[in-house]
Amino acid sequence: MNAGVLIVVLVGSLLLYPTLPEQMPHHFSVYGTADAYWGTTLGRWLLLPGLSILNAGTLYGTAWVVTNVPASWISVPGQEADELSTDTEQKRVRRTVERALYWMATFTLFLFVALQGGIYYVAVTPATSLPALVMGMQVLGLLGIGSVTVRLVWESS
């Protein structure tokens, strides 16, 4: 699913690029107001989609490593070595971490999509602030990442 969203974001960004004005925002205050602009270039416009691909690749790659490297290579904070001595327990912890990384990839992708849409909105309309919908999506994305992190810690202990 995430790969499909990444492709849609990349293709959508490429299709929207010709409609961008000469300047686009590249920084927003904590209140969502654009406070810095730069000249519009294809590289700058594709920066967030590129970072989202890099982020997803890193998180999915880490999930692969966690589930495929020898158990002796992985350290679980707060766990004694003998607590993870059974193969079943090691698989449980690895699977929990893998799922958490997949969910983090989904929530961070959600953040990148919301921000890319917000940048486009501020660039092509008279607005100078991100719409409430984008701000809400960012809050939901951050809450999602936080909840995954808390659940990971809880399930691994």
Image (cartoon, rainbow, N blue to C red):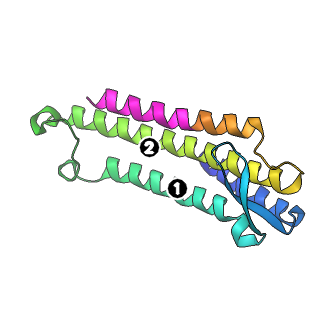
Q: Is residue 32 left or right of residue 56?
A: right
Q: On residue 55, which mark appears?
A: 1
How far across and down, in percent of the image, does residue 131 sit?
78, 40
- Of 38 and 13, nearer the camera is 38
Q: Magenta-highlighted stretch: main secondary structure? A: helix
How far across and down, in percent of the image, does residue 115 sit?
69, 49
Location of the N terminus by quadrant is top right
Residue at screen point 73% across, 65% down: 45
On screen, 57 above or below 114? Answer: below
Magenta stretch: includes residue 145: yes
Type of amino acid at the residue the image marks with label 2: Leu
Query: The residue tagged with tag 2: helix, strand or loop?
Result: helix
Residue at screen point 72% across, 40% down: 134
How far across and down, in percent of the image, does residue 133 sit?
75, 35
Tally the marks: 2
Location of the C terminus by quadrant is top left
Q: Tell which circle, 2 or 1, labels the residue nearer the N-terminal end.
A: 1
